[in-house]
Image (cartoon, grey):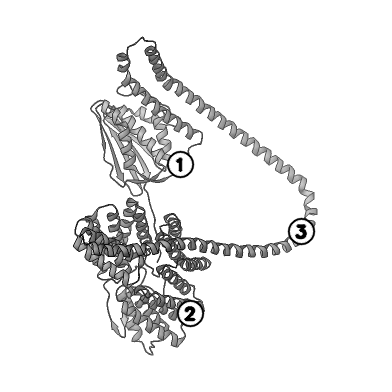
Amino acid sequence: MLFGKKNSLISNPLPQIGFFLFGILVLCTTQIRAQHETKDSLETRIKELRNTPNFSAKDTTHIDLLNDLAYELRYYKADSLLQLSQLALDYSKSTNYRTGESFALIGIGLYYSDKGSHKKSILYFKNALSVGKLSKSSTTVLSAQNYLASEFAYIGNYAKALIYYLEGIDIANEMDNKKMLSILNENVANLYASQKDYVQALEFYKKVKKINEEIGNEIYSAETMSNIASLYADMGELEYAMYNANAAIAIFEKNKIMEWLAYAYSIKGKAYLKGGKNEWALYWYRQSEMLHEKIQDERGKIELLNGMSQAYLGIGKDSISEMYALDAFAISKGIKDMEGSQQCAKTLYKINKNKEDYTEALKYHEIFQSLSDTLSRNENKKSLTMLKTKMEHEKQKADLIEENNKQLDMQRAYVNVALGILLIFIVVTLLVGRSEKIQKNLNLELQKKTEDLEQNELALHEINRTKDKLFSIIGHDLRGPIAAFQGLLKLFKDGEIEQNEFMGFMPKLSHDIDHISFTLNNLLTWGQTQMNGAVTRPEVVALETVVKDNIDLLSEIAKIKSIRLVNHLEAKTLTWSDSNQIDIVVRNLISNALKFTPENGMVTITAIERKQQWQVSIRDTGVGMTEKTIEKLFLENSTLTTYGTNNEKGTGLGLSLCKEMIEKNDGKIWVESLYRKGSTFHFTLPKAKNKYQRTA
């Protein structure tokens, strides 16, 4: 489909419910949105209304119910959508009920839109907009505005589509209608996504998520996540696509929202297809196909059937692939979907080429090329038109704001003249107390400067203390290995040791260089945090990747001591933290575990999922610690230095640095240890939480 998201209205009076036509009840098996009445409840209300004394079919409540039922059947019984909407339209006109008339016109427009009769649907949507303005109902106007914009987008007139969307956003802002703000902004995002302008699309999705955080409806969130999943699949970001699709599917299944569930299944199939996993793609496409047997969504079926065709082609089942591609091609031609026809023609070209039916292959290749040329020519114009339209709209808004500001400036000028006259009299009175006030302010300023000076003095002492500590550690822990390295090089240069002897020192030199690098990294990081230079920038971090990278980095040290490094972290262990800081923590803790574990020992890394956090544990079978040592480990400014089982030496900054980094990322760190049995270091980090929300 042109847009990943179907256009549906979320606010009354068009909820999605059941079906009642000319006194005959037809029950639907699909439950729609949780916030609306169930179809059973609605049917009961209709029966009760018809059985009341003095019932009139032209009653506004009855008309609203007809519109509700018509809209419910859009994806299930399209003919009933048309009949019910026409009936509601006739009743509304006869009683001059503008709101009912506007929504009835929208229902008829939706019917013709789904059938591909775009001229008719635009005509009905325009009429609905005109009637809605007469009814002075912002919901009616915004609904018609949204559908009219979407219809222009379907026929490729993105300039008009964008104008109607932006005008709708302005109205929704004025009325503080957050639901319609969500809808309109996300449909703009979908518009840019169809143009493959993914950056602009994501910008609008961010706006939608902020709006929907205030709305707090999980179904809206799921619909938005479905759209974002489709966008990420097109971008090749398959992991993000799968994450959003799975989250949306869970919500749609729970609430039994079948048309959106069919779409989400199809997007998951699309993600697998992009990743070359055809069998899995077919599995999810078939789930969507089964749901499409119960719903009437022709635009959605084009992408579904063409996707299934490509998947079957990928596993060598050309005849089945051709069947699905031809079905999709016929539907796209029927509803005049150029983009769908183009993609189907491309698939049919590949199928016939594989069959060596070059006549048919050439036919579909020519269709594909012709449509591609048309779309390519149009896309450039459309993109420029969209940009120009947006700029003109923003300029009109800026001009209006400027004009309003001029009027306000004139009013302020008159007010200021009056205030000036008043101030002349007030100044005379204030001069008496001015000197006392000035003196008081000077005293306060002097006191503040004195306090600031004292604070600066304390800060200077702290910086000097940090500097002294850094030079002490550098002199003690780095100067020795570097001096030894210099001396060895001098001996070799002066010919006092042979090359074979020099090469014998290489493992020790390599170990010393690694130690110097590790120590420098800790010193620089710690020094930066002490001098208020380190800034924590949280993001979604895959913890299993951080642990794996550090295991790879430290595997040589583990190999020297014959220590087994075991990583039990599963995929999707996602945290909200600063990746660089957590990398330093993991590296220090694994390095310490290796340092204090004797030969043939084992270091194990695990993670436990809590309600709001991940708890990561790094356990070793090393020498353990006494209670006295444990008490000193995490003290502020502690530089406790110990030696490993092979006499390895550290800077004493590692655990102090780890504690600071973990706390900066809203976590905690602690240790459990038994002397001569081993130690386990635990730390917690917040779980990553992504909220995605909806439009219609």
- As drawn, 245 above or below 629: below
Q: Position of residue 14 (x, y in %)?
A: 39, 74
Q: Position of residue 690 (x, y in %)?
A: 38, 53
Does the CB distance between marks 2 and 3 fall below 8 Å? no
Mark 2–mark 1 distance (CA, rounded to whole Å): 54 Å
Q: Which residue is mark 3?
A: 420
- As drawn, 187 above or below 524: below
Q: Secondary structure at mark 1?
A: loop
Q: Position of residue 457 (x, y in %)?
A: 59, 31
In which quadrant is the N terminus drawn? Answer: bottom left
Front-lying residue, 670 or 264: 264
Mark 2–mark 3 distance (CA, rounded to whole Å): 52 Å
Name the amino acid, label 1: Thr
Q: Earlier in the sequence, mark 1 or mark 3?
A: 3
Q: Which residue is mark 2?
A: 131
Q: Is residue 294 left or right of residue 489?
A: left
Q: Nearer the viewer, mark 1 or mark 3?
A: 1
Does the CB distance between marks 2 and 1 fall below 8 Å? no
Front-lying residue, 400 or 542: 400
Q: Residue at x 57, y 62 (%)?
A: 395
Q: Which residue is mark 1?
A: 536
Q: Counting other residues with Cα less than 10 Å from the Cα at mark 1, is it few (<14), some (14-19), or many (20 or more)? A: some
The single residue placed furthest to the top in the displayed view is 496
- As drawn, 88 above or below 139: below
Q: Residue at x 31, y 17 (%)?
A: 503
User: Can the viewer see residue 216?
Assistant: no
Q: Earlier in the sequence, mark 2 or mark 3?
A: 2
Front-lying residue, 388 or 586: 388
Q: Secondary structure at mark 3?
A: helix
Q: Secondary structure at mark 2?
A: helix
